[in-house]
Image: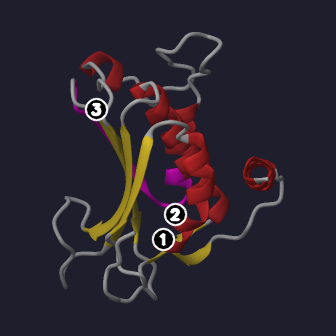
Amino acid sequence: TAILEGASELVRLLARLGSPQRAERRPRPINAQVRSASALLKHLADNASLSFAFEASEGARVLLNPMDVQQVLTNLVCNARDAIDGKGTIGVRTYQGSTDGTPSGQNQPGWVFIEVADSGVGMPPEVAARAFEPYFTTKPSDKGTGLGLATVRKIVERNGGRVTLDALKPRGTRITLGFPLAQDADDDKSAHC
């Protein structure tokens, strides 16, 4: 029954992702959005060790569409899983800062980040430079289309954000999504999960 329940949940989540109905963009708590995708991400991670760290304030809100968050995280976790061949670690982390990576201050606009990092082999510079190009892939044709990271970039930018890639060859890859804090974000204490 656990397998059937898991399969049922996966079908529901995939149906939501594929739905043509789009939720409106409005301020939403980033930690809650990542948590809502966690069941699907755990399933997609397969045998990889997947961990979550919620370092952003529980009140940190970002103007976004929740289905976009799920699609972006799905693409990134699937890429990470493939990079580690199901035998390494994948970490998903939220945190706050400024666009240059320093903590937010009174004179700097606040940003919220979602980071997905893996313990794979990383990417050589020539691959990292092309990683967000549509149809560029290093995977066999039956494993990838080259649209995953291009889609991630498009979705993040559509929601007013930025994407950075750190290919830590030979120690893995880290992709960071940054979004400006919505006007009504507050500074609740951080939570870890």
Image quadrant in which you'd find residue 39: bottom right
* Front residue of this view, candidates 81 and 108: 81
Q: Looking at the rendering, in which quadrant would you find the C terminus?
A: bottom left
Q: Which residues are magenta?
A: 156-169
Residue at figure coordinates x 43%, y 48% from the top left: 50
Is residue 167 inside the magenta stretch? yes
Chosen colour scheme: secondary structure
Element class at badge 2:
helix
- Disc 3 is placed on an element classified as loop
In the picture of the structure, the residue carrying the numbered disc 1 is 30
User: Which residue sits at x=16%, y=65%?
Assistant: 102
- Asked if the magenta segment contains residue 13, the reply would be no
Q: Position of residue 93 (x, y in %)?
A: 36, 59
159 or 90, nearer to the observer: 90
Q: List x then y, in percent, for residue 28.
A: 55, 77
Front position in the image: 97 or 141: 141
Q: Amino acid at mark 3?
A: Gly
The quarter of the displayed image where residue 168 is located: top left
Disc 2 residue type (three-letter): Val
The residue that disc 2 covers is 34
Disc on res. 106: none
Residue 5's place in the image compared with 35, above or below, is above
Circle 3 residues within 10 Å: few <14, some 14–19, many ≥20: many
Indicate which disc residue 172 carries.
3
Seen at 26% across and 18% down, the residue is: 124
Quadrant of residue 188 in the image?
A: bottom left
Instruction: Measure how far apart labels 1 and 2 are at the Cα level.
Output: 6 Å
Is 15 left or right of 50, judged from the image as shown?
Answer: right
Q: Pointer 2: residues within 10 angstroms few (<14), some, or many (20+)? A: many
Q: Are marks 1 and 2 in contact (CB under 8 Å)?
A: yes
The amino acid on which the numbered mark 1 sits, given as a three-letter code, is Ile
Residue farthest along the front direction in this orientation: 1
